Amino acid sequence: MVFRAPKAAPQSVVPAGRRGHLIGRFCHGCNQIFPLQRRMHSGDPIFGRDHVASPCPYEGWSFEPGAPWWEPAVEVLPPPPPVEAAAPAAAPKP
């Protein structure tokens, strides 16, 4: 069984054309993404490192709107397919 998760990143680093659904909250202190349902910075993140050597300085803080230590995390969409130049039409043979 393979666990697949969408690629996610902080909203500020993803170009507007490649932003998908809102996935969670990105903490600038520990660089991890926490689920939207969680109101406090605690527990295991949904995206991030498996082992954290030291606790985040924001551990236990509430995800209040407008706080500078976190920002929304969005799904990173794949780049659009390259646009192929239309080949010039050949002139009809007489």
Image (spheres, grey):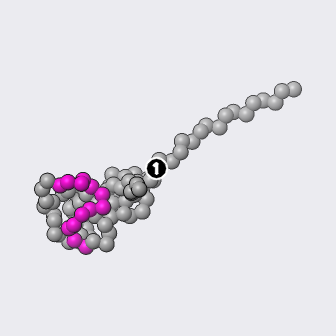
Q: Quadrant of residue 8?
A: bottom left
Q: Residue at x 31, y 66 (%)?
A: 35
Q: Position of residue 33 (x, y in %)?
A: 28, 60
Residue 24 located within the stretch drawn in magenta: no
Q: Is residue 66 above or below residue 12?
A: below
| Highlighted magenta segment, given as a residue range | 39-52
Q: Quadrant of the C terminus?
A: top right
Q: Is residue 71 visible?
A: no
> Which residue in the protein does label 1 denote?
78
- Most extreme residue toward the front is 1
Q: Residue at x 83, y 27 (%)?
A: 93
Residue 42 located within the stretch drawn in magenta: yes
Which residue is more in the foreground, 31 or 69? 31
Q: Quadrant of residue 50?
A: bottom left
Q: Position of residue 70 (x, y in %)?
A: 24, 62
Q: Is residue 17 visible?
A: yes
Q: Residues within 10 Å of mark 1 (few under 14, many from 20)?
A: few
Q: Quadrant of residue 91?
A: top right
Which residue is more in the foreground, 4 or 18? 4
Q: Residue at x 38, y 64 (%)?
A: 22
Main SS of the magenta part reads loop
Q: Is residue 84 above or below residue 17?
A: above
Q: Disc count in the image?
A: 1
Q: Residue at x 81, y 30 (%)?
A: 92
Q: Position of residue 20 (x, y in %)?
A: 43, 59
Q: Amino acid at mark 1?
A: Pro
Q: Quadrant of the N terminus?
A: bottom left
Q: Position of residue 38 (x, y in %)?
A: 27, 71
SS state under label 1: loop
- Most extreme residue toward the top is 94
